[in-house]
Amino acid sequence: MSISSTQPIAVGNPTFLIDRMGLDCSPLQFVRELTQNAFEAIHKRRDLGWSGEGRVIWDVDWNLVSNYGVFKLQVSDNGCGMTGLEIEAYINSLASSSGAQSYDRNFGIGAKISAGKENPAGLIYKSWVNSDGVVATFWRDPLVGYGLKQWERNGRYAQFAPLGLEFRCEPIDERGTSVTLMGASDEENTYWKGGAIKQKWLIQYLNSRYYVLPANLRLQVRDFSQADPSNWPTSPDKALSAGGSQMRTVEGMKHFLTKYCERNGSLPLTNATAHWFLLPEDLDVSGGVWDEKSHVAALWGSELYEVKRNREARAQLIQFGIIYGQGRVVLYLEPDIGRLDVLSNTARSQLLIRVGATSIPLPWGEWAREFRNNMPEPLRKMMEDILNRADSGNYADEIKRRLREIRDLLQLGRYRLTTRGKLTISGETPGSKPKEGTEPRGPRVNIGSKPKVGGANADLYAAFLTDAGNPGEEFRDRDNTPEVRWISIADGTREPDSLEDRAAQYVLEQNLILANSDFRGFQRVMEVLAAEYPHAEPSQVKQIVESWTSLQLTEAVLGVFSLQGSPEWSSSQDRSAALSTEALTAVVMARYASISQMKRQLGSLVGRARDESKE
């Protein structure tokens, strides 16, 4: 029997594929891809025996500035360079690269999909090998789609053309490559990012993307001091002599965080290392060139992935046990590649763990639990200092005392099978009964009927169970009353924009409720009570409002978890929705009964309310 050959798969519409994959890339992803390509070109030159300093420079294409007056972003390196045939092979083919391709290294498509979609007018490649230069343009032809533009010379067409030595730029010597980004048109300034983009966007992105830079390699960025491009110098000589710009060296986040943090350290976890940095209060030293704000990220190799900032970062830090002072903490989780088979998604935005033929996300939940249980002492002390300065009441004993009166209501009937049980369990869903006037819902599997295979009967033995009931017993949960902590901006326990205009947040992993003292709903209640009881101390009003609100929030959490056990509440998504910040805000906005209780308690402390009729 002969073995037939297989025709390899082809890409029917590469332009659609590039555009579609480009949608998954972040707006500045092209900077990372082109920078990484330059790094790999330098490593390849070293493999050929070269021992010089590797240099990568992000600048403008001064040839185009001098001749046409347009500023085009350009990245250049003194790596191995490419011949015309190599450009044709590597640039004009998907999943093709001059470097080694693998799941954990170069995919061969990153620059094409990220830079290609941002620059339909073209990516101009200029490259030299042993002082012989060539030029080629990868662009999006309006009729054909993506590909290398053909050059005409003496009636003959080719996908590259020779280029003289005079068009080289720093740091290219006899070898190297530069790529000019043309944008959407020949007139577009591709270096300048207007609108909400920061002026120093390029240097900040590179410093924030890389944790460390490769050894014996220098990465530099042109930094124009004027925000208005009409004031930019028009040649590198003018930039040097008259000023108006400078070359900044990219250092990476480890350099800046180590330099400016108060404390830092690394905590070994089961299959990762947590690198933490505690920043000083009111740190303001970045000058817009690195990310000095609190954030959380995954560290793989020398790069940062899955970066979470602002609200996402604070929520993540709370999971890791940083309840207070999140604005001062930077946390990087570095997977142990000896224990985990780590790879990146195509967009280089997320890390995955390969398990057999599939992949799963990083185990952030496991890492958070380990970190909480082994909290570094400087971080623990920082939170204790904030809490000691805060005016946050503890109402735990009072809440438990009040909850004793309704404990039975918060523990709906739930049952479990046991051979020693004195009850017979069958039929009804635990913790629920059908509404009056409705037919009870039938069982989810057929009981006592002919066995069937598949579908709802995937558990084959379910078909053989009897409907006579099984021995069991009723059980009650252990005391799982959540802790309530009040936070506010004034005492440093709440970060700006955290829980903004929300009443509270429930942190499942720590069974913790964070109540927002600054929430306008609470402030309004205190205003009303203070006006009705003007002889009461503000601290008394605050204590009573917080006490009764703590009870409301605690009841809501316990009530939702008492519903567990029924099919309708078996999903963690359902419970999360019921305990979301919006849901807890709705809970405390039902105020008729609670305000009556607050008035009664306040009256018992300070006497009768103000008599409106006597005013």
Image (cartoon, rainbow, N blue to C red):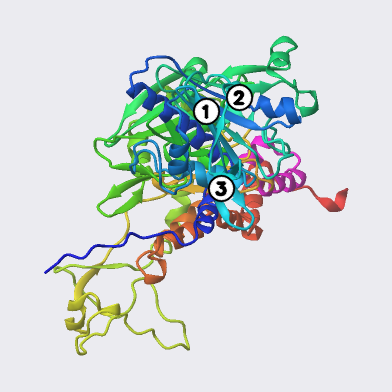
Image location (x, y in percent) of residue 554: 49, 52
Q: Secondary structure at mark 1?
A: strand
> Quick check: can you spot residue 314?
no
Above or below 238: residue 221: below
Residue 1: quarter of image: bottom left
Disc 3 crowd, CA 10 A, few/some/many (<14, 14-19, 20+): many
* Of residues 406 and 208, the one drawn nearer to the viewer in this rendering: 208
**Residue 614 disc label:** none
**To which residue does mark 2 refer?**
167
**Residue 133 disc label:** 1
First-in-chain label (1 vs 2): 1
Q: Residue furthest left?
A: 1
Label 2 amino acid?
A: Phe
Above or below 548: residue 222: above
Residue 523: quarter of image: top right
Per the model, the C-alpha gap separating discs 1 and 3 is: 64 Å
* Of residues 428 and 162, the one drawn nearer to the viewer in this rendering: 162
* Of residues 249 and 588, the one drawn nearer to the viewer in this rendering: 249
Label 3 amino acid?
A: Ala
Q: Secondary structure at mark 2?
A: helix
What residue appears at the point 72 percent right and 9 percent down from the top-left corner?
A: 241
What residue appears at the point 56 percent right and 48 percent down from the top-left corner?
A: 504
Per the model, the C-alpha gap separating discs 1 and 2 is: 9 Å
First-in-chain label (3 vs 2): 2
Q: Is residue 85 magenta?
A: no
Magenta highlight range: 521-550
Nearer the observer: mark 1 or 3; the answer is 1
